[in-house]
Image (cartoon, rainbow, N blue to C red):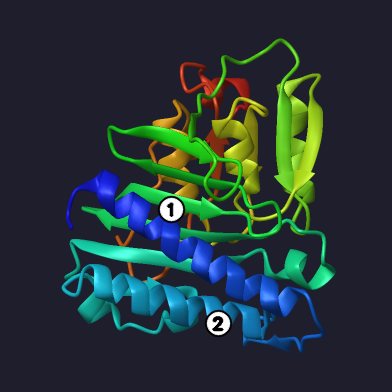
Amino acid sequence: MNSLPALSRAVADLARHAGAAIMAVYAGAFAVEFKDDASPLTTADLAAHRILVAGLEALAPSWPVLSEESADVPWTERRRWSRYWLVDPLDGTREFVKRNGEFTVNVALIDDHRPILGVVLAPVSGELVLAWQGGGAWREAGPGATPQRLHSRALPQRPLVAGSRSHASPAEQALLARLGPHDALALGSSLKLLRLAEGAADLYVRLGPTSEWDTAAAQCVLEEAGGAVLGLAGTALAYNTKESLLNPHFIAVGDPAQDWRKKLALAG
């Protein structure tokens, strides 16, 4: 099963399975541990991780899987990968802990440093978005729903800027002041990029730390919907190009025809 449409459907089914495991934990009491970087970890993260890794390995045994919960692969090994799965089993664990529903399951297929397939599931709402290179971006409102194609929008006169629910920074606010009058929408996890992909928001600025598994799946979705995820120098985010798995600072835009570097006075 190597065709991207068939793979995306199979990965979507896996994501829904992982989402069900997450919701089983979400429905009751759960403990919260903290990793070395102070980010939270729950049994839901680990349950989704196990389901996704086992399922992806069964789908394509020769393609490695890099998950947030098993990311300690030496660079000497990882640098040889040309195609691999990149997974965040529960993106937005802080939102999960707060029980505000704004968390997602993210699965991307990376080929030659670019995401060529992306699946993002919001377990609470049941919204699932999938995209593959050249195939567009599609949203299912819930299990069995008819997929609807997503398109980002041209920049309106008063943009809507999506921002992090838990990680907003003064530096981002200072940069957005250069944009002029705009409205703001606070959201957790990959939902910010999904709102851009569906034409409900226009810009997301991130000047704080994120990891590659945070962005890859939703980047594929946004690109296939007509948008872009760009480093401050104006080039698309790339994956597995260095030892560190942290992304550079970036912006996500619904209308890449705009000169965003000029509009935001970005130095790169």
User: In this picture, is 196 found above or below 154?
Assistant: below
User: In this picture, is 220 found above or below 262?
Assistant: below
User: In this picture, is 41 found above or below 202?
Assistant: below
Which comes before the other along the chain, label 1 or label 2?
2
- The residue lying toward the viewer, choosing from 74 and 221, is 221
Tell me the kind of residue under disc 2: Ala
Left or right of 187, for residue 242: left
Q: Which residue is mark 1?
A: 216
Q: Position of residue 99 (x, y in %)?
A: 82, 66
Quarter residue 37 falls in: bottom right
Whether residues under marks 1 and 2 lie with C-beta atoms below 8 angstroms apart, the answer is: no
Q: CA distance from mark 1 to mark 2?
A: 21 Å
- The residue lying toward the viewer, choosing from 247 and 18, is 18
Left or right of 223, for residue 18: right
| Residue drawn at the location 35% of the way across and 73% of the way down | 55
- Can residue 40 be seen by looking at this rendering? yes
| Residue drawn at the location 32% of the way across and 65% of the way down | 85
Few, some or many residues within 10 Å of mark 2 (<14, 14–19, 20+): some
Q: Position of residue 8 (x, y in %)?
A: 34, 51
Q: Which residue is mark 2?
A: 47
